[in-house]
Each structure stands twice: as C-alpha cells, then as structure tokens.
Image: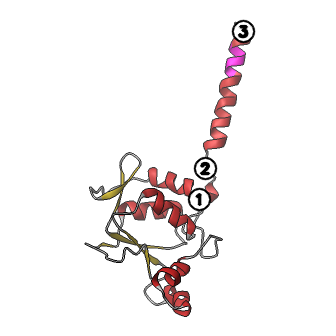
Amino acid sequence: MGRKFIALVILILVGGFVYYFFTKHNEENFKAPGKDWESAKKVEDYFIERLHMPVAEAEQIRSKPGVDGTADLRISTEVTLDALIGNLFYYGFVRDEKAFRYALEHTKDTTPSDKAIKVGKDGTIDTNAEYRISENMTAWELADLLLNKPAGHFPFDEYNYFFMP
C-alpha cells in the first residue's frame, strides 16, 4: 500500500502542475497592446477598406480633439461573441483571444441586458450599442467597458458598421 499511495500522490502533484502550467494565463496577454502592437490590420485599415475613407483622413482621424486616440466600436444584433473577440484581436485591440475571453468571463457584469451577447454564465454585452475603445486598454479594462459601460445605444444602423471613427 505504501508504494501505491506514493505513486498516487506523485500522479496528483504532476497532474496539478501540468494543469496549472497549461491553464494559467500569461499576464502579458492581459496588458494593453498599444498602438504599435503588431496585428493583421489596424482600425485605420478598416476605415479605408470598409468606410472608403481617404488614407490621409484615416491616419489622422483618431488624433482629432475629443477623440483621444479612440475608435467607436458599434455592436449590432448580428455580432457574435466569437466574431467580436476575433475582430478585436485582428485589429490589435487585444493581445490574445483566449486571455480576453477569460477577462470577459471573469469581469462582473453590473448592467445585465436581455438584448445582448451572452458571455459566460452571467455576462452580457449590449447590442445596438457603441463603445469608445483604444489599444491602450488592458483586456480587463476593455472587458469592463463592454460589459458595463456603453457610450450609447442606437435603434438601427442600416450600414452595420463595426468600427466608426
């Protein structure tokens, strides 16, 4: 019985270490990516390609007074959680999709909504809502903003824009 017990304890310890090692999120992945973070595209590319904004205007739009380097993220009723997370990663607003999903699932939603994207067990991100976001937000700050602090709501958007200047 002694050897079996020791083997079981070792197995439990090794299993616990492996679980911890592979499930612990790297704290770097929660940090704000910053404007210079390398991503597939930047939101300015979105302005040029989807909104047909002239290149010079797209490059300067977020430096205008009152904008403070932010972009307006509009979430329509057709947006899914996977699409939202994927786009925020693709355009460089989050460093890591899994870490951001973790932040969303572990941030308290103080403003639950019925017409919303469901996040985890109790979280909701309002649809037909807009949010002022920036690459200078950590995953935790962005999660809190999306779950609790829409800048406003809109009844209908015929253009279905995802990002607005």
As drawn, which residue projects farthest toward the right? Answer: 3
Q: Residue at x 61, y 45 (%)?
A: 24
- Label 2 secondary element: loop
Q: Residue at x 54, y 68 (%)?
A: 93
Report crowding for label 3: few under 14, some 14 to 19, many 20 or more residues within 10 A (C-alpha).
few
Q: How is the protein colored in the picture?
A: secondary structure
Q: Is residue 131 above or below residue 55?
A: above
Question: Which residue is nearer to you in this view: 24 or 154?
Answer: 154
Q: Is residue 148 above or below residue 133?
A: above
- Residue 134's x, y, as percent? 50, 73
Front position among marks 2 and 1: 1
Q: Quadrant of the N terminus?
A: top right
Total numbered labels: 3
Which of the labelled discs sits on residue 157, or is there none?
A: none
Front position among marks 3 and 2: 2
Which of the labelled discs sits on residue 2, or is there none?
A: 3
- Label 1 secondary element: loop
Instruction: Inspect the magenta stretch and tell me whether residue 34 lies in it.
Output: no
- Label 3 secondary element: helix
Which of the labelled discs sits on residue 96, or is there none?
A: 1
Q: Is residue 83 above or below residue 15?
A: below
Instruction: Identify the residue under disc 2.
Output: 25
Question: Which residue is nearer to you in this view: 46 or 2?
Answer: 46
Residue 33 falls in image quadrant: bottom right
Q: Which residues are magenta?
A: 5-9
Report crowding for label 2: few under 14, some 14 to 19, many 20 or more residues within 10 A (C-alpha).
some
